[in-house]
Structures are given as C-alpha cells and as structure tokens.
Image (cartoon, rainbow, N blue to C red):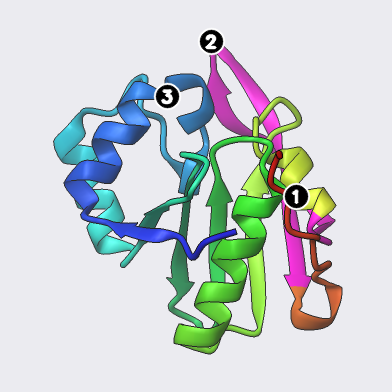
Amino acid sequence: MAEPVRLELPTGVRRLRRLPDSGLGFLGLDPLTQNDQWLLNRLTSMRATLYDTERGTLVGCAPNPANPRQARVAVAADDSAALTALLALVRATAGYTSFTAVACASDAGLPALLDCGFREVGTLRGHVLRAGAYLDAGVYYAADDDLRPHPQPTPHA
C-alpha cells in the first residue's frame, strides 16, 4: 500500500463531515454534533495529523503530550491495511513506539485496530454519548512488538 497522504486539517474536517457514521469517535470527535470550527480547533489543539490512504480511508494520529514516544490513532473504516500504513509512517517519521486508541464496540475502525495487534486494556464506562445513550468505550494499546504486519493486496490481473 502506498504511503498515506497528509491532509490539511480543514480538508480532514470536510472528510469527517462526509463520513459522519465513520467519523463518530475519530480521535474523540463527533462530526454529527460538533461544528466545523470546533472540530478544527480541537484537532489543532491536540496537534493531530490526518491522512488519506490509497483506498480513500481517513486515518489520523495525535501525540500524547505526557509521552512523546506515544500517539493516539484512529481509522475511519475497517481497513487494517490503511492503519498499518499510518503506523509505519508515523513510526518512521515521528519515532512513536506505542499507540493508543479509544473505540466503542460499534465503531467502524475497531476491527482494524484488533487486526493490527491492538489489545483492550481498559473500559471507560458511560464515556460516549451517541443517539441519546451513554456507551462504554474501550481503551486499546499496542507497542511496536504488538503490531502485526499485513501482506500487501495483490493487484488484479
């Protein structure tokens, strides 16, 4: 898979807005209830970077201010190849050695996190408000040694 392409944050916000179901919970955001300026301000304050992958999957990361070798990551679809490409990129360019993610059971990207080697290390009870109900959110973690490589898809003849 080709290296993810970095997006300007306003472009990333527009992408989140177009994928509201996939965007729910992406780096803790809710494009259904938060306006574009709020989303942009939040992404800027967390020093997030958003990327587009060759399959069009939105992925992103934000550094952990308390641990400069750790980043929070998000993937807006069940696309483990896209997440693998993001992890490889930010490991090489930013030197991250461990990653966290927060996801609800219904989040589109949760299968990709698990497929890449993330494991659930905790639960935030009633942490996320969606559709009028408070849902639990899982906290997921992976260090370099936990990450699973994924084979490259074979081009169709």
**Image position of 35 (left or right of 140):** left
Disc number placed over residue 19 in the picture, else none: 3
Disc 1 to disc 2, C-alpha distance: 43 Å
- Residue 154: which disc? 1
- For the stretch drawn in magenta, what is the main secondary structure? strand
- Of the two numbered discs 1 and 2 in the rendering, the one whose residue sits closer to the viewer: 1
Horizontal side, residue 91 vs residue 118: left or right: left
Counting other residues with Cα less than 10 Å from the Cα at mark 2, is it few (<14), some (14-19), or many (20 or more)? few
The span shown in magenta is 116-142
Q: Which residue is mark 2?
A: 132
User: Separation of disc 2 and disc 3 at Cα?
Assistant: 20 Å
Q: Quadrant of the N terminus?
A: bottom right
Q: Residue 78 bears which disc, if any?
A: none
Q: Residue furthest left?
A: 37
**Direction from residue 139 to residue 38 in the image, left or right:** left
At horizontal 65% and vertical 30% (from top left) the residue drawn is 108
Vertical placement of residue 130 versus 137, above or below: above
Q: Is residue 127 magenta?
A: yes
Q: Is residue 99 above or below residue 145?
A: above
Q: Quadrant of the C terminus?
A: top right
Counting residues from the N terminus, which is met first, the one under dot 1 or under dot 2?
Answer: 2
Categorize mark 1 by other alpha carbons within 10 Å: few (<14), some (14-19), many (20+): few
Q: Position of residue 90 (x, y in %)?
A: 51, 76
Secondary structure category for the residue under label 2: loop
Q: Position of residue 80 (x, y in %)?
A: 71, 49
Question: Is residue 67 covered in magenta?
Answer: no
Give the amino acid at mark 1: Thr
